[in-house]
Image: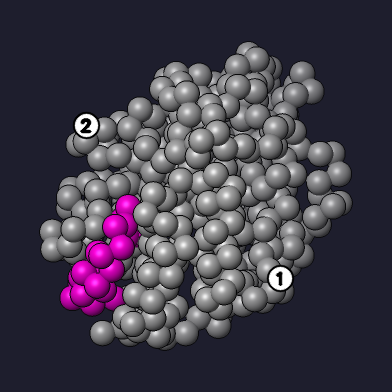
Amino acid sequence: MKITDVRCVLLSAPYATPDDAERVLHLKTGFRPAGLIRVEASDGSCGYGEVYSGVYAPETVAALTNQLGEAIQGQDARRPATLWERMRLASYYWGRLGISQSVIGGIEMALWDLHGKSLGVPVCDLLGGRTHDALLAYASGGNNKPEDELRAEMRGYVEDGFRAVKIRINNLPGVDEIVQKVGICREALGPDVGLAVDAAQGLARRPWTVKQATTIAKTIEQFDLMWIEEPAEVANYDGFAEIRRNISIPVAGGETVTSLTEAESYLKADALDLFQPDASLIGGLSVFRKLADLCDRRQIPVAVHTWSAGVGIMGNYHAAFASRNCSIVELPSVPNPLREAVLAEPLRLVEGKVPAPTSAGLGLTVPDDLESQYPYQPGTYYKILGATDRQETE
């Protein structure tokens, strides 16, 4: 089964609601792109992967896919690890970190999908074996919006059966507004539903200082939080560690890492209570699994980050189910048709948990007309334009 084609499938789809903060600040066209990877084999079969960087630099992802795909043309599609190594060597002098690694990972994800389908088994069974029957899922939403809408959103999650929710606390004027928002969500969810907060300081023009982050965290400790995410600029590993030493809320991060090299910087600094790798960014399912094992040896749980379309979500879930120290997975709640359009079976919750995948490969059914349904629109990529300096919380 030889590889005959590797290509990037760029798409653009309506995203979120018109007043959603992410859409207002960063996706003003109302659309968000996705970068899927399609690998075709000589027997007529194909597999799909996704590169989360396609949200931010879709045309770069497409160009890199073309170049890196040349390194594996004509090779045996059933050898993802060997082909990952070929692509690593092909990018050695120019792409050991960053978006090139994410593209390699997206191609590798497609290879695992193809391999799993050829054997008739779920990909998680090929990544070391399934280690969970089900995993707790948290609803990921809580963007800034009017109080009545925020309360309704939180109550909706409870009604849908979620036992955990994450909200955003960035782009707010000050500490009082943060406390108010977290308090509203805790009240609406009740005491029995887990609540986490995402400070998203990697996207801030002026990220919180260690002192600011510590002060803010102490003011919201009263709300019994599962974790505070990205309370400092993402490469401020020592800052993460200092914050962690001085607050009682667990500190989470790591969603932006694109390699084990970056990931090890967090581990060496003892910076995290909870690591949040994303298989569609970090360099593939194999790298995700290696990182999960490194964390396991340090007794650090893993909480999957996945804010991509449906292909990336499923890639992350398969890696999660093969990682014994994965404690929880993210389930985006912002409306995005590219999430459900590619799934063989709808994602469902059973007592707040996602059951282990059972379909072959990644469990995808990609419609033949997906590109015509959601044609790529240049300029729809995620922009930092419109982000404000409302990060200067004292």
Tell me which numbered mark, 1 or 2, is placed earlier along the sequence.
1
| Scheme of image coloration | one colour
Question: What stretch of residues is rendered in magenta?
Answer: 208-229
Packing grade of label 1 (10 A; few <14, some 14-19, many >=20) is: some
Say whether residue 218 is magenta: yes
Q: Distance between the residues labelled 1 and 2?
A: 43 Å
214 on left or right of 1: left
Looking at numbered disc 2 in the image, what kind of residue is underneath it? Arg
Answer with left or right where residue 76 lies relative to residue 232: right
Residue sitting at 31 percent across and 63 percent down?
223
- Which image quadrant for residue 380? bottom right
Residue 352, how many percent across, how many down? 50, 39
Residue 208: x percent and y percent? 29, 76
Residue picked out by circle 1: 30
Up-down relation of residue 47 to residue 180 (above or below): above
Hey, which quadrant is residue 13 in on the image?
bottom right
Residue in front for this viewpoint, 72 or 104: 104
Magenta portion: prevailing SS class: helix
Quick check: marks 1 and 2 in contact, CB under 8 Å? no
How many numbered marks, from 0 up?
Answer: 2
Dividing the image into 4 quarters, which one contains the C terminus? bottom left
- Residue at the image position 73 percent from the left and 52 percent from the top: 337
Camera-side residue of 94 and 180: 180
Query: In the image, is residue 358 part of the stretch drawn in magenta?
Result: no
Which residue, given by chain and number where applicable, does mark 2 sit on?
297
Q: Given the current orientation, which residue lies at the most extreme top position?
A: 119
Q: Badge 2: few (under 14), some or many (20 or more) residues near its Cα, within 10 Å?
A: few
Secondary element at image label 1 = loop
Q: Which residue corresponds to the image point at 30% horizontal and 39% vertical from the top-left?
A: 301
